[in-house]
Image: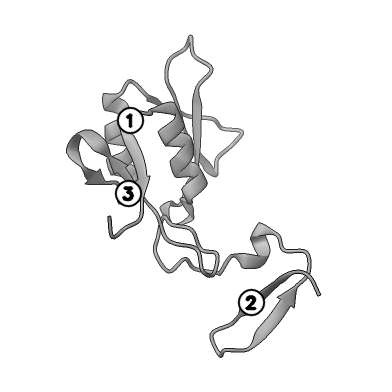
Amino acid sequence: MSGVWIFDKNGVTRLVTNPTRESFEQKEPPYPGTATAPGARPRVLVYLPANQVIRSYTELEQRLAELGWTRFYNSNQPNLLQFHKSANSAHLISLPKNFDSFKSFHMYDIVVKNRSFFEVRDPAS
């Protein structure tokens, strides 16, 4: 028996033989803007110069604007918030429109494109 055992709220287990990301996701995340897989540690995005935990897209957009990122409005992708560095750059950050769907892989995308300005941490750190 290979796979992953999942415990639900009532303590009942079930075996997921071919797990996918969707099979681990819950309807509503326990911590908005964090990973939702059972057993996954929640993460937060931190703006390093101010040691500020980013808790909303308003805060994130302000910090990205300070770094030269501008909002990119794409009518073909209405469910995404997108930011680009400049007209001469291929760098693009795409985020879900709802901050509650902001996951750690979105955070790491921001970190990779702004290495010395952002960091992903455990909330307790």
Left or right: residue 111 compared with residue 5:
left
Check disc 3: other Cα within 10 Å, few if <14, some if 14-19, many if 20+: some
For residue 103, side relative to residue 61 (left or right): right
Give the amino acid at mark 2. Ile
Q: Residue at x 70, y 81 (%)?
A: 14
| Snapshot quadrant of residue 114 | top left
Please provide percent x and percent y for residue 119: 35, 40
Q: Element under label 2?
A: strand
Q: Quadrant of the C terminus?
A: bottom left
Residue that sits furthest to the top in the current view: 88
Q: Mark 1 sits on what residue?
A: 64
Q: CA distance from mark 3 to mark 2?
A: 31 Å
Amino acid under label 1? Leu
> 53 left or right of 24?
left
The disc, 2 or 1, on the residue closer to the chain's N-terminal end is 2
Outermost residue, left side: 50
Pick whichever, 119 or 86, lies toward us: 119
Q: Which numbered tag is attached to residue 56?
A: 3
Camera-side residue of 15 and 73: 15
Q: Residues within 10 Å of mark 2 (few under 14, many from 20)?
A: some
Location of mark 2 (residue): 6
